Amino acid sequence: MVRTEQSKEDTLADAVAKIREKAGTGMLTDEEILVFACAEIARTYTYEEKGYLRR
Amino acid sequence: MTKPACPQKFLVVLPSNLGDVIMATPVLEGLKRKHKDSFVAFFVEEGFDAGLLTNPWCDSIIGFQRREIRNVLNTGRWRDGRSLLAEITERISLEQFDVILNLSQPNYISSLVPLFNGKTVVGQQYLREGNHCVGDDWSQYLYAIPFYRMGNNLHATDVYRRIAGVKSHRGGCTLTLSAEEKAWARGFLASRGIDPGDRIAVFQPGAALPSKCWPPEHFVSLGKLLAADGWNICVTGAPVEQEVAATIATRIGTRAVCAAGETSFRQSVALLSFGQACVTGDTAQMHASAALGVPTYAIFGPTNPVETGPYGDGHYVFSGHCPQMPCFKSECTSQECMKSIAPEIVFGCIQTGRGPDLPLCNVYRTSCKADGDFELSPCDPGMHRYFREEDVCLVRNIFDDRWNCLPGASADFAHSVAELGKWLEMVSDMCNALNRFESLRDPMDIRKFEQIRRSLSGFAGVGAFCTALLNIRLNSVPLLPPEHAAGRTLDACWKTHKQVGKAIS
């Protein structure tokens, strides 16, 4: 399947990569910061979720 | 000139974990006492709000559904997750908070903070320029602690209060229960054959990390000693801790009941409120017990009781013998430090209300000093200290103008001062390189600056703390506009140079 430009940008990783190119060269918008926050939250886990309590 | 309006609306940001939320409650009280008629809200992850419900100092709890949003983000429907997150940030933005007080350290919270649109932000925030920034001195202190823990003697609560700019008071942490919650606990105990007026010891054998758990057989031995002395024992815990809690209760005998897995956190705290003793590791239950004023016997292994011990007067902390402690490991194959804390030592403290004469482990008593700060005092002068007094003096002199406790010149102190003298010379060279760059724009000067900056990582002790502090400040310099970066970097270097210089002068 040939991926269109639109579908490329429709993953969180692609959206973040695009913003990373801008970070440090231009001021980020609320929307761009929100997408960054999404990427950070997608990676979060708590101790409990890591299974430390299941001994 | 008109006097600036007093901030009236505060948002404290600390989504997790439960223990941290309880440790931050004195900030709420401090804000309400300092700013009369102010509105104080708390941004917290759902589940961890259990430490705040019915808190008289908290006007509003703003729940954060992190797990739900995280799960949606990871299902391929990330735009739906983005919308859920946007709903929360817009809701907070509409509240128009005067001050956002970010006490949490994870980067994902820092990224959310600018979207809250507070007039002032204290603590870490992500800058629109594209980097994280820790702007205030006491938040920088908090971030620098892990780089040299022996230079810190402040409890997390006392650091939080300094970040918030609220005075110390002797009230401790706040955790309140409703009449219904107390009635439920009374009924639960009665249904298990325990008169709520009897002597009850609450055991919390589980902890977030396996390395923080006291061995179950030690809980059993302690329980048997207490039961023989007429105590009832209630073993609490989360559903995943039910098996081990039930085994402990069964092995202790008829005077022990297991409540683990049958209660919410609030219900286990309600049970705890009827206790005359709580034996626990470094857990949320420990902070809850201290907040309720229940005599707390906290078993510490990999973590540091100076930073996160049971806050308040008259609690006991036990720690074992291990050369690496506090190691902060989540798992440990030997658990030597925990195993070496004998149940008989803990029993002696519960029974007599004082430290043992000849303990085989470290025993400390907690108190709040006259200035309101938490203090962990070893029961014997020969016991392990979690900080070096002289290094604490040097570090505190960097941050606090009123802190002036330079001790007599011991060899160690003289060595630390000499090391900081070398550190200052290097930072001075960094400043000179930046100054030259500002006038000549020669990239060689930036390379020299970076080279010296890397060399600072060779410092140990207080020097390592100062290097961490400087790096936190340098990393916080806004990246844009680039022509201002060198000047701002220079400011950060000079500020740190001046403060460290003052500390050893």
Image (spheres, rainbow, N blue to C red):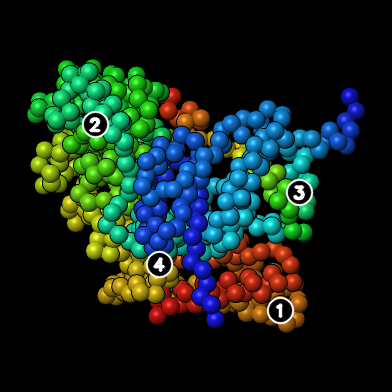
* x, y percent for residue A11: 76, 35
Look at mark 2 in the image and give the residue it sits on.
B202
Nearest to the eye among marks 2 and 4: give it. Answer: 2
Q: Do the residues labelled 2 and 3 touch (CB within 8 Å)?
A: no
Residue B226 quadrant: top left
User: Nearer the N terminus, badge 1 or badge 4?
Assistant: 4
B62 on left or right of B265? right
Look at mark 4 in the image and give the residue it sits on.
B395
Look at mark 3 in the image and give the residue it sits on.
A19
The residue lying toward the viewer, choosing from B213 and B140, is B140
Seen at 78% across and 51% down, the residue is A21
Real-space Cα separation, disc 2 to disc 3, in angstroms: 51 Å
Seen at 31% across and 36% down, the residue is B178
Seen at 70% across and 33% down, the residue is B80
Residue B94 lies, with reference to residue B251, above or below; the image says below
Q: Which amino acid does label 3 sit on?
A: Ile
Q: Chain ID for label 4?
A: B
Q: Which amino acid does label 2 sit on?
A: Val
A49 on left or right of B220? right
Q: Do the residues labelled 1 and 3 touch (CB within 8 Å)?
A: no
- Which numbered tag is attached to residue B438? 1
Q: Chain ID for label 1?
A: B
